[in-house]
């Protein structure tokens, strides 16, 4: 057991090093891209505070160091980052780190719901398809999966919005809290009520991936020699599924689900915009459209971190739950 | 071993298995893989089934257990202790009365520990009995906590054999139990099967390893292209080609390394391109127009059975 713990720690450290180097690379690339873009941060800043004279403008440029070469600017930005200073959002006039923290809480709740929902639904449907290969259940669900994975997120969001919010009135049209209420007065149920539709949209977009993957894995398992032997020993369909199918498909499904944080984040940008949900996803598009460079860079780095953590959990999980990896040393 | 007076534990007669295939769009083709196969196994004996790959040995096992793929068509009769095997009876018997010993570690669930796996799915789990069996086979105490990938080939083999013994099955079918084993391991495995037969069980031993099979089996059924061409006592095979009946069995004997290593021309016909008459006729030196036209039926000859018009 000790050996296993040691190996997990080693995997963890390796992943951390990889993650840091990736963050470093992302920071260079995104900084270079922003520098090369026609965005003038000084102009954006001035637009927010009102008319200024030429001297004042020159003063701001000198204070910000816009005239310095990009490498110098990059390193001063990096130094600030390492001290925990992500700068101030030009759009919201608040520290970037605060905005990320606040928005992430909203997004996290929504993404978590979507993630769990798509995982459970996707895996179950995958199992149903795999166990009923080429029967009507398989055909219907498979077509549904292909359909949903080719539908654009925002379109699906709009359709759900039209049906459930406008026509039926079951869910609110947007935002994370009821309009005209103080933040501390909002109950957990109201929050869940508001995140239900965006979370549903997001999970509908992502479950087909896990479902189709689980289907294929289940078919492979059911065609395997050990299933043939289990049948020869008198196991019926349900026992085959419960004793062998489940344990052999859930592991890759879990890994896939943790590795899907990137799609989850990408999907949340679209879903949050459609539902005007104040999460990280809508913040990133607002930052992009309004040339809010500090916020944009901050969220870029944060989302990189988020996706990396997902992949790392997937790696670590495999080491813990797959006996082939776990018990190698014994 | 047995005079044939009592009822065989397993009697397969006239078994044919074919698969429905779609050749072109909506054009069905039937692929005959087992044709008119006959075997009998009595309690207390080992029947070895010998034949090259593609002769339908493994499909016979699936047919007996009723676990053929869904597109398979089966005709003919299979009797277990005199009772016709229906799908319902097969469901009841597999894993209880009829046990399969598969070939390799691949037949164990890679994510299930050996102990739980050997216990099987039937409750109450026979863990006490299984531990005793593991001990008898010289498997170390901690084997039950091992995953299949942690077992050596020989250990996996013994775990697989114990899955059959745990059940009190009266009929044990071992599918190619020896390939990949050292001579000692193979001998040990065959000794285990001999022991089962001596305990009064009926054992079917499907094998490539003809020499070893001859040393441990009582009778031998020779398969060719999905049918039985001869059943003979193991003694006949030790005695040589003159004691054997079918031209293919004689050729098989001569092809063994210690008997001259002498091959015959041609190849075994595969499903889909089977000849109309005797399946061996295209390669037989004694074939006549009758052999090409007509399928010979199994007949008794010198206390063995043969599927040939001219065998004497």
Image (tube, coloured by chain):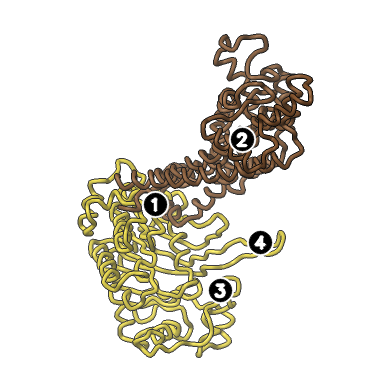
Q: Which mark is residue A265?
A: 2
> Do dots 1 and 4 share one subunit?
no
Residue named by callout 3:
B270
- Which mark lies nearer to you, 2 or 1? 2
Asked which secondary structure carries label 3, the reply is loop
Q: Secondary structure at mark 1?
A: helix
Give above or below for A8 relative to A295.
below
Q: Nearer the viewer, mark 1 or mark 4?
A: 1
Front in this rendered view, residue B238 or B243: B238
Q: Which mark is residue B22?
A: 4
Neighbor class of circle 3 (other Cα within 10 Å; few <14, some 14-19, many 20+) is some
- Badge 4 local density, few (<14 within 10 Å), some, or many (20+)? few
- Which residue is at the front of the view, B243 or B210? B210
Q: Which residue is mark 1?
A: A324
Q: Quadrant of residue B79?
A: bottom left
Place residue B188 in its image quadrant: bottom left
Which subunit holds the residue at mark 3? B
Q: CA distance from mark 1 to mark 3?
A: 39 Å
Residue drawn where x is 34% and y is 86% of the image:
B243
Residue at left 30%, top 41%? B124
Chain letter for the yellow part: B
Q: CA distance from mark 2 to mark 1?
A: 31 Å
């Amino acid at each position: 057991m000790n050996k296993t713990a040691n190996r997990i720690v080693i995997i963890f450290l390796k992943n951390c090093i990889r993650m840091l180097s990736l963050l470093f690379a992302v920071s260079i690339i995104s900084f270079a891209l922003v520098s090369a873009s026609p965005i003038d941060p000084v102009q954006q800043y001035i637009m927010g505070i009102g008319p200024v004279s030429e001297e004042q403008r020159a003063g701001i440029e000198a204070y910000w160091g816009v005239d310095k070469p990009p490498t110098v600017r990059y390193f001063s930005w990096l130094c600030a980052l390492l001290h925990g200073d992500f700068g101030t959002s030009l759009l919201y006039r608040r520290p970037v780190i605060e905005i990320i923290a606040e928005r992430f809480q909203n997004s996290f709740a929504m993404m978590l719901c979507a993630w769990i929902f798509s995982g459970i639904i996707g895996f179950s449907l995958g199992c149903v398809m795999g166990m009923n290969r080429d029967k009507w259940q398989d055909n219907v669900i498979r077509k549904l999966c292909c359909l949903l994975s080719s539908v654009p997120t925002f379109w699906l969001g709009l359709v759900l919005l039209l049906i459930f919010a406008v026509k039926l009135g079951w869910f609110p049209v947007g935002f994370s809290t009821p309009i005209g209420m103080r933040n501390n007065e909002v109950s957990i149920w109201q929050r869940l009520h508001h995140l239900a539709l965006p979370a549903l949209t997001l999970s509908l977009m992502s479950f087909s991936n896990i479902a189709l993957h689980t289907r294929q894995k289940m078919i492979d398992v059911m065609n395997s020699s050990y299933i043939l032997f289990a049948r020869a020993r008198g196991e019926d369909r349900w026992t085959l599924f419960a004793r062998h199918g489940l344990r052999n498909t859930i592991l890759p499904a879990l890994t896939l689900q943790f590795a899907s944080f990137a799609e989850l984040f990408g999907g949340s940008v679209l879903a949050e915009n459609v539902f005007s949900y104040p999460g990280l996803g809508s913040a990133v598009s607002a930052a992009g459209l309004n040339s809010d460079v500090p916020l944009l860079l901050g969220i870029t780095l944060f989302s990189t971190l988020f996706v990396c953590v997902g992949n790392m959990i997937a790696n670590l999980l495999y080491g813990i739950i797959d006996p082939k990896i776990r018990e190698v040393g014994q | 071993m047995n005079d044939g007076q009592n009822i065989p534990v397993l009697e397969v007669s006239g078994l044919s298995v074919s698969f429905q295939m779609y050749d072109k769009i909506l054009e069905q083709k039937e692929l005959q893989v087992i044709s008119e196969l006959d075997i009998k196994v009595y309690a207390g004996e080992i029947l070895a089934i010998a034949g090259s790959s593609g002769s339908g040995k493994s499909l016979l096992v699936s047919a007996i257990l009723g676990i053929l793929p869904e597109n398979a068509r089966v005709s003919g009769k299979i009797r277990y202790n005199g009772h016709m095997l229906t799908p319902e009876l097969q469901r009841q018997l597999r894993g209880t009365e009829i046990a399969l010993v598969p070939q390799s570690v691949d037949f164990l669930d890679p994510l299930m520990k050996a102990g739980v796996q050997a216990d099987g799915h039937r409750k109450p789990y026979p863990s006490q009995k299984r531990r005793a069996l593991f001990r008898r086979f010289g498997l170390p105490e901690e084997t039950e906590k091992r995953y299949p990938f942690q077992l050596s080939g020989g250990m996996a083999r013994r775990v697989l054999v114990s899955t059959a013994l745990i059940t009190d099955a009266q009929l044990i079918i071992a599918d190619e139990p020896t390939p990949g084993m050292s001579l000692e391991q193979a001998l040990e495995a065959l000794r285990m099967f001999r022991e089962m037969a001596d305990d009064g069980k009926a054992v079917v031993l499907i094998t490539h390893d003809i020499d070893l099979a001859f040393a441990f089996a009582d009778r031998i059924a020779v398969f060719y292209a999905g049918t039985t061409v001869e059943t003979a006592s193991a003694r006949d095979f030790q005695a040589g080609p003159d004691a054997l009946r079918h031209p293919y069995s004689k050729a098989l004997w001569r092809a063994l390394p210690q008997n001259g290593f002498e091959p015959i021309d041609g190849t075994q016909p595969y499903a889909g391109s089977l000849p109309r008459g005797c399946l061996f006729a295209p390669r037989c030196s004694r074939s006549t127009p009758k052999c090409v036209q007509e399928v010979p039926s199994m007949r008794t000859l010198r206390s063995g059975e043969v599927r040939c018009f001219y065998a004497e």
